[in-house]
Image: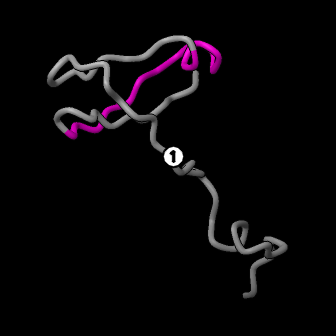
Amino acid sequence: MPIFEYRCQECGQRFEVFFRRPEEAEKETPACGKCGSRKVRKLFSLVGLGGLNRSELSGGCGTRST
């Protein structure tokens, strides 16, 4: 399920919207939960990677020194 982050152009509220498919995000303009405005801008969101340790992120081979 894709999650898209938006910022309301009227009140500045940041919010997330869940869509079943990415193409739904292109067809629908969500309303701000705070003020109800549809003047929103989609934000660029960073993807979080969970469950990885530092050696996996740095390209290490995953072996441990003892």
User: At 40% from the left edge and 34% from the top edge, which residue is drawn?
Assistant: 41
Q: Position of residue 35 (x, y in %)?
A: 15, 22
Residue at 51 percent across and 46 percent down: it is 44
- Based on the displayed image, in which of its 4 quarters is residue 55 positioned? bottom right
Q: Amino acid at mark 1?
A: Phe
Residue projecting furthest to the right: 61
Q: Which residues are magenta?
A: 12-26
Q: Is residue 17 magenta?
A: yes
How many labels were placed on the picture? 1
- Quarter-wise, where is residue 54 in the image? bottom right
- Which residue does the numbered mark 1 point to in the structure image? 44
Residue 42 percent location from the top left of the image: 45, 35
Percent across and percent down for residue 14 are 29, 38
Q: Secondary structure under badge 1?
A: loop
Give the quarter of the figure containing the N terminus. top right
What's the coloring here? one colour
Picture layout, residue 50 above or below residue 65? above
Instruction: Tell me what residue is drawn at x 63 percent, y 21 percent.
Output: 22
Q: Is residue 61 above or below residue 47?
A: below
Is residue 61 shown left or right of residue 13?
right
Question: Image quarter for residue 36?
Answer: top left
Classify the position of the C terminus by image quarter.
bottom right
Relative vertical location of residue 64 with respect to residue 13 in this rendering, above or below: below
Residue 20 colored magenta? yes
Task: Identify which residue is drawn at 52% across, 16% down.
Answer: 19
Q: x and y percent of residue 52 in the render?
A: 64, 58
- Name the side, left or right, on which 66 lies relative to 50: right
